[in-house]
Image (cartoon, helix red, strand yellow):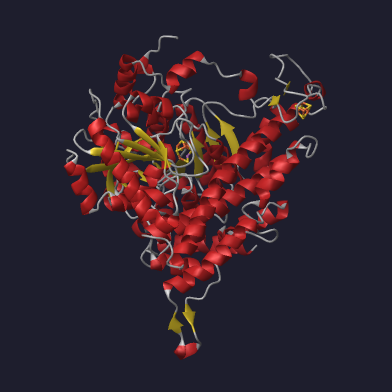
Amino acid sequence: MAELDLEKLSIDPATIQMLKKAKADGIETIWDRAAAMKPCPIGAEGACCRICSQGPCRVPPPKKKEGETTAEKKQRMGLCGATAETIVARNFARMVCAGAASHNDHSRGVAKLFKETALGKAQGYQLKDVAKLKRLAKDWGVATTEGEGEDAKPRTKEAIALEMADKILLEFGQQDGELTYTQRAPKKRLELWRKYGIVPRGCDIEIVELMHRTHMGVDQDYHNIIKQCSRTALSDGWGGSMISTDLQDVIFGCPVPVIGEINLGVLKEDHVNIIIHGHEPVLPEMIYVASQEPELLAYAQNKGAKGIQLAGMCCSANEILMRHGIPIAGNYLQQELAIITGAVDAMVVDVQCVMESLANVCKCYHTKLITTDPRARMTGETMHIPFDDHHALDIARQVVREAIDNFPNRRSPVMIPEAHTATVVGFSSETIQYLLGGSIRGTYYTLNDNIINGRIRGVAGVVGCNNCRTTHDSSHLTLIKELIKNDVIVLSTGCSAMAAGKYGLLSPDAAKFCGPGLAEICETVGIPPVLHMGSCVDNSRILIAATACVKAGGLGTDISDLPAAGAAPEWMSEKAIAIGQYFVASGVYTLFGVTFPTTGSEILTDYLFKGIEEELGGKWDFEVDPEMMAKKMIAHIDSKRKALGIDKARERVLFDMDMRREMAEAAAAGEEQ
Ligand code: NFS
Ligand code: SF4
């Protein structure tokens, strides 16, 4: 096997330390496999079709042929005559499908739990955030009182939730009409979606239709396929993902700022260490409750441990960090390494982003690998404890007990890296409104003001995965630092937010990395320049924040008018593609790093990078170099500032009330048009 230069694989010392231990212990990691297996270039650019058994048909672009005409390019085709455009668009579409399906299926589970909770049948769960429940009731057309006029009495939270749950569950199988949350979008945006016929009808139908349309011999027009990609992705962003974020907030509590810690150093040698890894916060919430119960703590002590240390991995981690301050052991690429510490007594997984190699790594240490979701079994799992929301707490107790029982089986030597960084997290769109909003209007008024006056140059969403084909965490860090240095405030989720946390960017101290304007805001309000907004389904919080900015006035009338941009510099999952597509369809300039899955067709890529902007106001872009990526995002932000007529404001013109009112009136007039 090729000799790896471990120091170059990550910028995180804890990761490198564990890679060295892996080597000493003779354990293979994803990086070893990456060195041994080169990615297929034809597949990487989306130019391999294997949707029927006459193929696979490969239609890679010809090697740099000067002066090739469009007609010649089009001649490259599969056996059935499928062009590179069709083949690449279909492959891209199927990524959107799988990504949206992951989010929407997660959401369905949460909606079902919401209903069971309302019925009092879900052991251990409550409707915690009643204020949010009542706010949501308005969106769903559910009354919060019963009776008329003076006789009106408040309805119980259970009654409200139950009626809401039935309406929400219907949206999954809905055949016609428009998903409820699309109505939250700025008016102009919704009109645009209607004009192009891409308002999603239901959470499931768009995915099914797109799968059908990408079957052999159906939709053979790349433009038409991408249109359905938008509709499908919107059913995720403004459908499934948004529903799960909202309902999780109601059941588990809407995140408010909380202090947490990130990196492998959160594991404790003298404690029972349980890692919860995956995406759905439903079981982790109960494991959190169980891990604090006196009986289980006593049981752990009985086995020689000082206590129980719960830590998260991937988006499950984000969910419990945001709500309870439970530490995060690491992001996606650190999952094997956590086990290699030798200190993890149970690795508890549910769905998504779980590496199959965990089973092998666990075998080499004492770690129990516990799968909990009947949809996601693993050959080589230690045990399967299927989750059932009627007995969630009992199941969680069983999981914790299994981990405790395993504590005495530790084999030496245990090695836990020291690195763990303090963070402030929990920035829901509600929190941002509270911290940066105006007391008068209770909107994003003050945030807008600071964007208009130029203290904040713009807003960037930096999100997404790690990818072993690029230096772990490096692009996230470089990109985010470059943005905040230029006064761009960063909203972050997923593995990107964890990367930001590891290097101190989720702390108010990070103001020292900011340009003067953003530093001033961070110091005055006491917030970090990078706001951790949660897991990947919580990217829907970014859509809501963007919409709130539009509605607060002064920054145009649509999301595409905002001085904003999005990026996933180290993406790897299909979910990332679905997210990117719904941001583009929502009017956002969205950049991805590492590789881009449509480069096998210049025509299609051109459309995604340029043409689509004329229709939807947002577009894709691809940039490997994070500094260049920052430059492109800032240039885009500046062009939007110019279009809004606030480019001069960066020179510190302070807007007085009259000027603001004028802008608000202009914006209102625009919205009426
Ligand atoms: Ni998002 Fe979260 Fe991480 Fe990527 Fe995977 S954990 S859902 S997909 S790898 S950011
Ligand atoms: Fe080849 Fe067409 Fe079959 Fe795809 S659908 S594998 S291009 S014959």
Give the image location of residue 83, x and y in percent.
78, 28
Outermost residue to the top: 2
> 234 or 608, which lies in front?
234
> 447 or 572, which lies in front?
572
Residue 354 visible in the shown view? yes
Judged left or right of residue 93, residue 468 is left
620 vs 284: above or below:
above
84 vs 150: above or below:
above
Give the image location of residue 101, x and y in percent.
59, 45
> 191 or 553, which lies in front?
191
Residue at 27 percent across and 39 percent down: it is 405
How many numbered tags mark residues here? 0
Residue at 29 percent across and 21 percent down: it is 17
> 208 or 624, which lies in front?
208
Judged left or right of residue 147, residue 199 is right
Tell me where residue 365 sits by quadrant: top left
30 vs 118: above or below:
above
Give the image location of residue 649, x and y in percent.
44, 48
Residue 554 visible in the shown view? no
Task: Name the quadrant of the C terminus.
Answer: bottom right
Judged left or right of residue 428, residue 585 is right
Tell me where residue 519 sits by quadrant: top left
Residue at 19 percent across and 39 percent down: it is 303
Residue at 40 percent across and 26 percent down: it is 472
Give the image location of residue 375, x and y in percent.
53, 43
